[in-house]
Amino acid sequence: MAKKKGSKLLIWIAAIGVFIVVASTIGVALLLDAGGPGLEGEPEFLHVRVNSSLTDAPGAESMLVDPADLPPLTTELTALLRDAATDDDIKGLFLDIEGVGVGWAQTQELRDAIGAFQAAGKPCIAWADTYSNKEYYLATACGTVYAPPTGLTLINGLAVTQTYYAGTLEKLGVTANFEHVGDFKSAVEPYQRTGPSEAAQLAMDAMLDGLFGTLVSGIAEGRDVSEEQARAWIEDPPMTASQAVELGMMDGLAYRDEVMDDKVGGDPTSLKSYLRDRRRAWRSRGTQVAVLHIDGTIVGGRSDSDLFGGRVVGDRTVVKHLEDIRKDDDIKAVVLRVNSPGGSGSASDAMWHAIELTREKKPVVVSMADYAASGGYYVSMGASWVLAEPSTLTGSIGVFGGKMNLAGLYDKAGLTLHTSQRGRYAQLLSSVSDFDPAEREKFRSFLQGFYDIFVSKAAAGRGMSVEDLHAVAQGRVWTGAQALERGLVDELGGLDAALAKAAALSGSDASDLRILRYPERKGFLEQLMEQLTNPDADAAARVALLRDAGLNQPLDALAGLVALERVLDGQVAALLPGQLQVD
């Protein structure tokens, strides 16, 4: 007992010590920032730096950042750019690109906001030392694009690489026993095959065609060339910035300081100071609208992070947020910001039910980000109005489930197991036996029942017949543009359009909306205490060390398996296949 008390005392001492150090650091930082560029005087360029740390939802924040200066979320940045377009104190935009860490839909949402800035007649200058697909797609929203003389350009098209575990499982003596409902529901294939099925490849090709078309059309529009010319650039991409300039893909070669001095004109308005000003303005607005982030893999229980740094969104957390929102009469509408590949079917259904209860009291609008597929679509389908970006990956209306038979692995380890049972299906979900034909049929009937519920609820939400909904379901993934054509979403657009729709449905003034985000962005002390009391903290630190050692690939594969195990846990799963990422 004395040891436990001593440990707790050390934790509190450490917390107080860090609190003092961090508070001092923030105080110094605020003093240093006091002399930065202001918003008074002659109009200036706004300097916006985009890097790989950009994120869509509130989450783990840096402990050395004043809460007033937390980095902007993607949707905050887009709102800021749209405000700047009509701000007489801002005469232009310097887009400083260090990397784009968000997915294609968020990149497109940000690009549209830059386009709105340019459409207001204000110049936009983009600069980066490395341009890959997303960076160049974003930069072409600006009228002028620069790179340094030694810059790297590799705008070479899209690729999706998926990991298949069947060979590894065979070597371990593990057999995958999975069933799925939906011809295109390929989430189980990585555990049972060494490559995609014909149906999975067909769906993947259609999805890539849609995303590639968006990339090509965006480049063509931004550089004022034909789509044939843009496609030719991608098919035979230049590798150096000078070659890109010769081809007309960029406007010139210059170092960052040269662009700042010669094109921007000295010290521009910093994003930090302008964001602080915008946040004050946003907080002064009158009509409250809740923006509830459903960001990450859907699981039963509470929202948190897994050992690999990935987000998981728990049904209990979301249900509690929705209950609080329903009880608050000052909140006039709800926007669900969905950025999820899906997860647990039962957890998705619990969220759907809570959303239905909320919609009885106030409008619920969905804004889809990079993903709103499987369970991510399940929670979206009952909303009053659904919006997606053209590049959002959505749909995937289908389910799967099953188990891993570990008997061979135990045998390799020298373990002997003996099972006694009563009841024909006592070992239905046993981890040391394969499904026999009767068990497989029994389990498949369970999945079919859940799929029927999924389709019927989606049909009711979309105002379609069950037959028509089933025709575009079956586990197939669509882009947002393809989903609109098939009636799975109502409109293309980002969070700004979703907020405007929520205002219209609630009879509110769209220009006077004050956003209340759920979950709230946490301060450094709250995060510190969570870390100190997190039982998984040591394991998470070990994973970080392995990543630093360059072992990303096996870790990413392991992360997928860990996520699958947590999602299933004897339940039906509605999840995208593997670690689906379009590069």
Image (tube, rainbow, N blue to C red):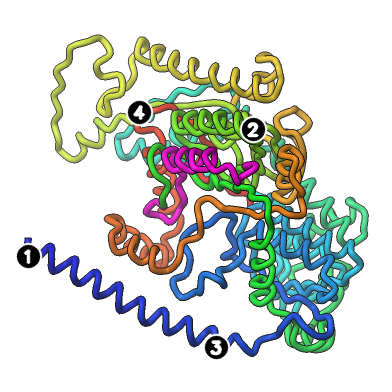
Q: Nearer the viewer, mark 1 or mark 4?
A: 1
Instruction: Inspect the image, locate mark 1, and give the three-letter code of the amino acid beneath it.
Output: Ala
Residue at x 82%, y 76% (from the top left corner): 89
Bounds of the magenta span?
305-334
Can you identify the residue that label 3 sits on? 31
Label 1, residues with CA under 10 Å away: few <14, some 14-19, many ≥20: few
Amino acid type for the residue under numbered disc 2: Ala
Who is closer to the viewer here, 503 or 491? 503
In the displayed structure, would residue 580 be above or below residue 511?
above
Q: Is 263 located above or below residue 163 in the figure?
A: below
- Asked if the residue at tag 4 contacts the one at tag 2, i.e. Cβ–Cβ closer than 8 Å, the answer is no
Residue indicated by mark 1: 2
Q: Secondary structure at mark 2?
A: loop
Question: Mark 1 or 2 closer to N-term?
Answer: 1
On residue 570, the disc is 4
Closer to the camera, 444 or 28? 28
Q: Are marks 4 and 3 in contact (CB under 8 Å)?
A: no
Q: CA distance from mark 1 to mark 2?
A: 54 Å
Q: CA distance from mark 1 to mark 3?
A: 44 Å
As for residue 314 lying within the magenta part, the answer is: yes
